[in-house]
């Protein structure tokens, strides 16, 4: 009886713990499922003029934004602003010009420029959009391109927003200070000042700020005055990455507090007044204050909050803290990251060849670069892979080796391709993948012989096989056999050899540097009913590339139309895909200078299927694409990149074509790892006042000011035109309320 009681007790405990585990597990899964990523990207735009402003609209999803990830670089885009809109004036989903929201609610949700990093809101704080909001029905992303691109480049810049379905404790919003007066010339220090009284009944709590000017801005700061005490909201050099910088201390703004901001400019090199405006030749004076309020409190600015006036202005002039206009210490790193590009971004075709030094290029199946920047071209000579090449058991019918040299080593100098070595005659049966390691050992996959070879160039200038993996002409799926292995890559850290065994076996096999089997990963799986196959499953793993520094493997899952990313042990991390852009991926290559390059082999039912695509480092999203200026790619099979050069090999109609492209970009703008938490704060004494800066001696300047003011406010609040004097005068008297 005692044993029965004990067993009953144990069973009850197990049942209880199991139930709690299931409930807890379900709750965790529910929370994870409630947060999703939502990309907002322009779909393949190429600016045709300088200072090109474009915008597009999407329906606002329902939920709460907790994080913003920029999907762009300053080399391509000057700035982006995301608006939450109650209505849209445009009758199209995409338009050019300054227009954003229509009449009604217009709120700035986020702004980005100068390679600013991602921004995550504090715990419990979020922007409400869609049905969860008070009137944000649409999201409009405005993008400003400084210059047209060079070459045939399509841009997919935008933002990735993270949306949580759980109602937060606090709701976020943005309040914008905007200067409107022209800047006089020949002034080392000129201040543009804004001040408004907060008239809302809801306490608001600033938690981040952002500044924005063009080239003449030196310092922008924002303060509020409560009970005769001035508190700094934020201060920053606008020539640094223009991120939303988090505020380290809690602060509260209440009814009657004075809100103020000031921009310091240096116009020493200018000979005429500079207007405030949208264009690169103009200037801007913006201080963005991101704040939150309690969810249950009244919204203080139902139609969007902003200040462009000068209320209680004498008070501001007399008391605004001197620290707010003092220059910050230089920061060469931040200034280099955010420096305006001196080179127009582009991807330029430099060369294309079908023959070299008497060698006709057959189908180019593989490309690799050695440690001297020579390019190895692995091609099929006179042999073509077609429906008659293999029998039903995957055995090649023509078992005579290709007589021509199948590996051509080319110099890639600025003067053009030149032949260094012609190798591999009478050695291979159906060339496919090639890789060259740090010591210039050559690895190839031969789908005809079902083998992988490690080779070197011997003293006689001939290829010498060091070892082979796989049994010649014998396909299989065990540790000693492959079935049409497609690609090979070798880790520079430990020499591990990774082989995509793709055409018959859906796997990646890992070997030691001396060819001993270690492990394999991957299963067979295909996309079904519009859903992508599970991570770790392949439908023809066709190419592989290694990012040793970040411990990542990139595998081209060809027929599933994606690149899967794994760690070096084969654990799946994420995938890179976009069914609207490409439906297959033949080749992908990681280049530390620019990120991941990928190319579809067939266009499919997409607009940009005959382009090559680029997803920058640490991004899972394609951000731009390129193609030849004249003509199209014709069955591209392989892509490789090093430095600023990209090489693409084609296989169309049994012949090969080799392309060389050069990426034109400013090297200082290629990447940034700066986060808002890493930005140094510069506290200082707050003791004295700022200068009077309203120009009083020129009626022309005043007219410029009125026009600039109208343009800025119209852009912010979403009005397309200013047709009536009543509206114009109302805009000129906007204050905080």
Image (cartoon, rainbow, N blue to C red):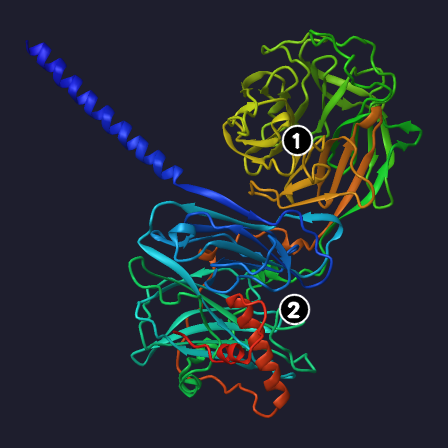
Is 253 left or right of 59, judged from the image as shown? left
Write down the residue under mark 1. 585
Q: Secondary structure at mark 1?
A: loop
**Could you tell me residue 404's position as x and y percent?**
87, 20
Q: Residue furthest bottom?
A: 697
Between 649 and 578, the one lying in front of the other is 578
Q: Residue furthest left?
A: 1
Count of numbered badges drawn on the protein: 2
Looking at the image, which residue is at 68% across and 79% down? 269
User: Badge 1: few (under 14), some or many (20 or more) residues near its Cα, within 10 Å?
Assistant: many
Residue 652 can be seen, yes or no = yes
Is 401 left or right of 75, judged from the image as shown? right
Is 713 left or right of 395, judged from the image as shown? left
Q: Secondary structure at mark 2?
A: loop
Residue 442 can be seen, yes or no = no
Looking at the image, which residue is at 44% across and 72% down? 222
Q: Residue furthest right?
A: 358
Between 495 and 71, the one lying in front of the other is 71
Looking at the image, which residue is at 57% across and 38% down? 549
Where 537 sits versus 215, above or below? above
Earlier sequence position, callout 1 versus callout 2: 2
**Could you tell me residue 380's position as x and y percent?**
82, 22
User: Badge 2: few (under 14), some or many (20 or more) residues near its Cα, within 10 Å?
Assistant: some
**Could you tell me residue 332's position as x and y percent?**
58, 63
Where 438 sits versus 188, above or below? above
Marks 1 and 2, Cα distance to the nearest angstrom? 39 Å
Residue 448 occupies quadrant: top right
Is 252 left or right of 16, judged from the image as shown? right
Write down the residue under mark 2. 279
């Amino acid at each position: 009886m005692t044993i029965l009681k004990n067993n009953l007790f144990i069973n009850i405990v197990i049942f209880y713990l199991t139930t709690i585990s299931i409930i807890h597990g379900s709750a965790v899964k529910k929370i994870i499922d409630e947060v999703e990523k939502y990309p907002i990207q322009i779909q393949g735009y190429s600016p045709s003029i300088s200072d090109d402003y474009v915008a597009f609209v999407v329906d606002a999803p329902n939920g709460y934004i907790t994080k913003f990830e920029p999907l762009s670089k300053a080399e391509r885009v000057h700035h982006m602003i995301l608006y939450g809109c109650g209505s849209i004036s445009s009758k199209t989903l995409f338009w050019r010009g300054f227009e954003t929201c229509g009449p009604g609610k217009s709120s700035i949700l986020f702004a980005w420029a100068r390679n600013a990093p991602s921004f995550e809101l504090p715990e419990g704080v979020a922007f409400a959009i869609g049905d969860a909001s008070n009137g944000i029905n649409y999201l409009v992303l405005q993008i400003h391109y400084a210059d047209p691109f060079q070459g045939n480049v399509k841009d997919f810049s935008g933002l990735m927003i993270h949306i949580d379905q759980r109602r937060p404790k606090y709701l976020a919003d943005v309040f914008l200070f905007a200067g409107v007066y022209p800047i006089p010339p020949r002034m080392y220090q000129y201040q543009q000042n804004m001040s408004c009284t907060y008239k809302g009944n809801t306490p608001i709590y600033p938690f981040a700020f952002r500044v924005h000017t063009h080239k003449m801005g030196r310092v922008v700061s924002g303060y509020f005055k409560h009970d005769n005490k001035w508190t700094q909201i934020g201060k920053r050099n606008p020539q640094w990455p223009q991120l939303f910088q988090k505020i380290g201390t809690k602060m509260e703004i209440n009814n009657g507090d004075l809100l103020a901001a000031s921009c310091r400019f240096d116009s020493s090199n200018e000979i005429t007044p500079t207007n405030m405006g949208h264009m690169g030749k103009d200037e801007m004076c913006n201080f963005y204050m991101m704040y939150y309020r309690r969810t249950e409190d009244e919204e203080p600015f139902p139609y969007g909050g902003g200040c462009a006036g000068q209320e209680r202005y004498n008070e501001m002039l007399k008391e605004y803290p001197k620290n707010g206009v003092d220059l910050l210490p230089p920061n060469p790193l931040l200034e280099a990251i955010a420096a305006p590009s001196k080179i127009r971004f582009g991807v330029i075709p430099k060369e294309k060849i079908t023959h070299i030094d008497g060698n006709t290029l057959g189908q180019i199946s593989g490309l690799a670069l050695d440690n001297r920047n020579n390019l190895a071209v692995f091609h099929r000579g006179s042999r073509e892979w077609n429906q008659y090449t293999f029998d039903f058991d995957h055995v090649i019918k023509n078992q005579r080796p290709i007589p021509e040299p199948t590996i051509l080593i080319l110099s890639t100098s600025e003067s053009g391709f030149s032949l260094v070595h012609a190798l591999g005659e009478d050695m291979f049966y159906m060339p496919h993948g090639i890789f060259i390691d740090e010591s210039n050992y050559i690895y190839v996959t031969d789908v005809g012989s079902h083998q992988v070879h490690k080779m070197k160039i011997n003293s006689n200038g001939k290829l010498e096989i060091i070892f082979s993996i796989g049994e010649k002409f014998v396909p299989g799926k065990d540790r000693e056999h492959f079935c049409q292995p497609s690609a090979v890559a070798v880790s520079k850290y430990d020499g591990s050899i990774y082989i995509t065994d793709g055409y018959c076996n859906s796997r990646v096999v890992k070997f030691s540097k001396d060819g001993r089997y270690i492990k394999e990963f991957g299963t067979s799986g295909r996309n079904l009913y519009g859903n992508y196959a599970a991570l770790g499953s392949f439908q023809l793993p066709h190419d592989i590339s290694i990012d040793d520094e970040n411990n990542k493997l990139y595998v081209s899952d060809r027929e599933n139309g994606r690149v899967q990313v794994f760690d070096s042990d084969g654990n799946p991390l994420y995938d890179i895909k976009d069914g609207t852009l490409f439906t297959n991926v033949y080749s992908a290559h990681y280049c530390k200078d620019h990120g991941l390059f990928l190319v579809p082999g067939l266009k499919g039912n997409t607009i940009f299927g005959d382009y090559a695509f680029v997803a920058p480092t640490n991004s899972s999203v394609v951000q731009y694409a390129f193609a030849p200026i004249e003509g199209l790619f014709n069955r591209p099979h392989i892509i490789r990149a090093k430095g600023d050069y990209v090489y693409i090999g084609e296989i169309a109609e049994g012949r090969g074509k080799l392309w060389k492209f050069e990426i034109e970009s400013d090297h200082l703008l290629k990447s940034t790892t700066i986060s808002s938490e890493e930005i140094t704060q510069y506290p200082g004494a707050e003791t004295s006042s700022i200068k009077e800066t309203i120009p009083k001696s020129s009626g022309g300047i005043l007219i410029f000011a009125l026009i600039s003011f109208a343009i800025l406010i119209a852009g912010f609040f979403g009005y397309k035109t200013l047709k009536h004097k009543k509206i114009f005068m109302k805009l000129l008297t906007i204050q905080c309320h």
